[in-house]
Amino acid sequence: MLRYYDEIGLLKPARITLSGYRIYLQTQLDTLQQILFYREMEFPLKEIKKLLIAADYNREQALVNQLAELKKSERGWIP
């Protein structure tokens, strides 16, 4: 999955070692978390990429929105 995300330009590693290992820093891990959230909400990868590269994209606001969505979905959950 990570290799594919790199291939389509959705999530690039911070660097790749000489032996081919992909190194991800906290920034990339935060982006991955957002990608996975949008995938869970059934957004297509092309739409996720558009969201993440948009000039007006606000990571902090996106996290607030995601939290609200999670809380909303928890209300319908019955243990």
Image (cartoon, helix red, strand yellow):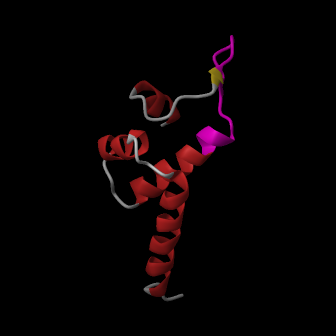
Q: Which residue is drawn at 44% across and 78% down?
A: 73
- Residue 22 position in % (x across, y down): 63, 25
58 within the magenta span: no
Q: Which residue is drawn at 60% across and 47% down?
A: 30
As rendered, which of 59 and 35 lies closer to the eye? 59
Q: Which residue is drawn at 48% across and 58% down?
A: 62
Quadrant position of residue 79: bottom right
Q: Which residue is drawn at 33% across and 53% down?
A: 43
As rendered, which of 35 and 18 lies closer to the eye? 35
Q: Vertically, is 65 above or below 57? A: below
Q: Vertically, is 13 above or below 79? A: above
Residue extending farthest to the top is 18
As rendered, which of 4 and 47 lies closer to the eye? 47
Q: Vertically, is 70 above or below 3? A: below
- Residue 34 position in % (x across, y down): 50, 52
> Magenta residues?
16-29
- Residue 9 position in % (x across, y down): 42, 29
As rendered, which of 4 and 14 lies closer to the eye? 14
- Residue 37 position in % (x across, y down): 47, 57
Q: How many labels does the image show?
A: 0
